[in-house]
Image (cartoon, helix red, strand yellow):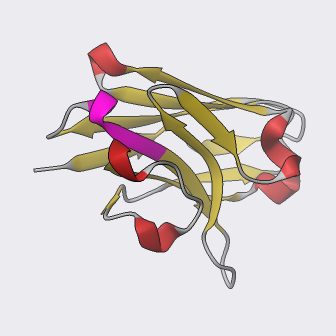
Amino acid sequence: QVQLVESGGGLVQPGGSLTLSCAASGFHLDDYVITWFRQVPGKEREGVLCSSSDDIRYYGDSVEDRFTLSRDNANHTVYLRMNSLKPDDTAVYYCAGRVRWYGCSSNPAGYRHWGHGTRVTVSS
């Protein structure tokens, strides 16, 4: 059974950093692309970054210089490192996975497997 579990969210001051984790089980991580999405109330879920075994894609200019993604296939975990956080980064962050063959996509409808999300609040 495919499972994704996010952790690491919390309250952080503007300019601070957080690292989110997405723990995967039930499949080989290197066979999947993993994408981080985020969502605020009243808005659509938006893609943040996508990672396959040989590619990382950023969605949105606002995160490319501040967010990084890393994969630890041996420990079945994908990490989202977020630096220089801004209040606009406040959202629930989700990781989603799909078979690598389909490649990266920022369209949430293209993902079958989702975690339950972890909340990030950037506020002073």
Relative to 115, residue 51 above or below? above
Residue 33 sits inside the magenta stretch: yes
Q: Which residue is found at the position 64% from the left and 78% from the top?
A: 44
Estimate the x, y position of residue 102 in percent, counting from the top left.
39, 53
On the question of residue 124 being in view, the answer is no
Magenta region: 29-34
Identity of the residue furthest to the front in this view: 101
Q: Which residue is found at the position 18% from the left and 38% from the top?
A: 27
**Among the 4 quarters of the image, the one containing residue 80:** top right
> For the image shown, how many numbered marks are present on the structure?
0
Relative to 54, residue 35 above or below? below
Q: Which residue is found at the position 79% from the left and 30% from the top?
A: 83
Residue 97 sits inside the magenta stretch: no
Relative to 60, residue 79 above or below? above
On the question of residue 122 being in view, the answer is yes
Estimate the x, y position of residue 82 in percent, counting from the top left.
72, 33
Q: Which residue is found at the position 72% from the left and 52% from the top?
A: 59
| Of the pair 123 and 94, the residue shown nearer to us | 94
| Of the pair 21 and 2, the residue shown nearer to us | 2
Estimate the x, y position of residue 65 in percent, counting from the top left.
86, 32
| Of the pair 31 and 46, the residue shown nearer to us | 31
Residue 87 placement, left or right of 58:
right
**Among the 4 quarters of the image, the one containing residue 85:** top right
